[in-house]
Image (tube, rainbow, N blue to C red):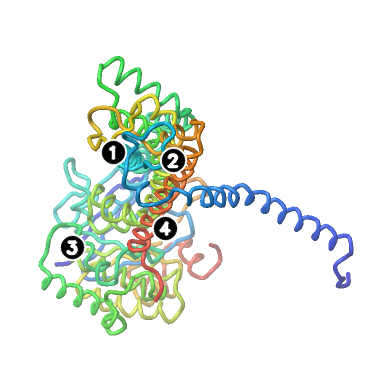
Amino acid sequence: MSIQTISTGRRAKDTIVRGLVYLAFAIAVVPLVSVVYLVIKNGAERFDLEFLLHSMRNIGARDAGGGAYHAILGTLEQVALASLMSVPIGILTAIYLVEYGGNGRLANAIRFFVDVMTGIPSVVAGLFILAFWVLYLGQSFSGFAGALALAVLMMPTVVRSAEEMLKLVPSDLREASYALGVPRWRTIVKVVLPTAFTGIITGVMLAVARVTGETAPLLLTVFFTDSINADPFSGPQMGLPLYVFDQAGRPNDTAIDRAWAGALTLILIVMLLNLAARLIARWRSPATGR
Amino acid sequence: MAKQIQVSGLDAYYGSNKAIEDISMTIEPRSVTAFIGPSGCGKSTFLRTLNRMHEVIPGARVEGKVMLDADDLYAPGVDPVSVRRTIGMVFQRPNPFPTMSIYENVAAGLRLNGRISKARADEIVERSLKGANLWNEVKDRLNKPGAGLSGGQQQRLCIARAIAVQPQVLLMDEPCSALDPISTLAIEDLIAELKDEFTIVIVTHNMQQAARVSDRTAFFNLAAQGQPGKLVEMDETTNMFTNPSEKATEDYITGRFG
């Protein structure tokens, strides 16, 4: 056998496949770029201080002006409350699955139901809270009810991503810790969780980003308002996705502009949260380098 | 402070699979005992039964008796955590905690077990790193990550971490198998120093290493694949390597099998 040059056929195949890969990439990027471009271009119109600091109270149907302060406030509160509920439960569940449950029956049942929960359409989560919290328990529409629905949506994402991250922690480290005479719970708290911290944060951020844009569950739970309601525990609140939905459905340009600005704000909030999470993750990441 | 270990009639299982059968031996204090034998013969499993690390694996269990001086390690009610504080372990692959600095790694066993003063921690960290012959190499970068050290340094860091909790016994599971010859030499020198203070048990695949570092050697073998491993014989290392009483030992040592 002698050493041969690359045949023309292989060269051609290489070129074709390479072209296909680039094409697929370009197609995938088109919607992303166009969404960002359109939202920035149209949103910039009304993205000003008045928009960020005023509500829609006393703004008539055709009036210009007005803002989304009430919606921004509502979204931040609802997402924060939802995270406060779902992140601890989600991480504790993941710890159970990885550190205690193993492949037992209960652990596998939990994994199965978490997977089922991942597939729940968001409107169903909203309906569930509406039926249970508002209609059955007789509580009022509130930001908290919205947060409950969002928490239902967040939890499976947090559980699954935290579980994957905890699984990545080498069992060498657990054994090293046990061999030092460190009890199991302390090993989890001081060795396993810090090692998986960066990944868990990323998972939590994905979950937060997912629910921040949810509209349907909010429609059914926080109801709707044009006024500022800073108390998430009583009375209807507003959320940014809801605000965008509402404004975009109105016929006049002033409202459409507000909808675009709302969409821009929503994207910026998610981006800022992501950035903050990245910074925290970098600050706490496993130290490497010499 | 070093203690004697006395094992009698010990069996270890993984699920229903018996890994080692009917092992009895005495491990003398302030000496180095080496375990040799072909892969899969249960040396590491046996080592892990000595500080109750075996049972960390799901489904694993142990029958028989392990006495540390007068204490039965497998008596009902004995806390495995306290057993492991008394009998430390160094693993095959260096495994410093990746989120911790060199200093924190050495202090980990102390800090994770309760509060100690900064001054006391400083003192123990320095003493342990000196004990592991690592102090001079790392004293200027104690706050740098432990994962940034070379493999041999990481393994000495793990030894420093293990001796920082002041165990009575130090178990080493092939501590040099992932290291280059120079790092191996450093660890072997260290073992020779540590045996003044600790009872040391070392598993090794390297017969020259067993001959170099140990006072007594135990040879493990298994009748066939799938059979449980057994202790063939145990004797002074010099006897084992010059005049073994069992044919199997001689065959293994001279390289006729395994």
**Of marks 4 and 2, which one's residue comes earlier in the chain?**
2
Q: Amino acid at mark 3?
A: Leu
Q: Give the image location of residue A95, x and y in percent.
A: 33, 42
Q: Between disc 3 and disc 2, whose residue precedes?
A: 2
Residue that badge 4 annotates: B220
Total of numbered circles in the picture?
4
Chain designation of label 3: B
Answer left or right for A265 relative to A78.
right
Whether callout 3 and callout 4 share a subunit is answered yes
Quadrant assignment for the C terminus of chain A: bottom left
Q: Badge 2 sits on which subunit?
A: B
Q: Position of residue A40 (x, y in %)?
A: 51, 52
Q: Earlier in the sequence, mark 3 or mark 4?
A: 3
Nearest the camera: A101 or B250? A101
> In whole angstroms, how far apart are the C-alphas of marks 2 and 1?
50 Å
Mark 2 highlights which residue?
B17
Q: Quadrant of the N terminus of chain A?
A: bottom right
Tell which of B162 and A38 is nearer to you: A38
Q: Give the residue displayed 76% in from the left and 57% down from the top.
A: A19
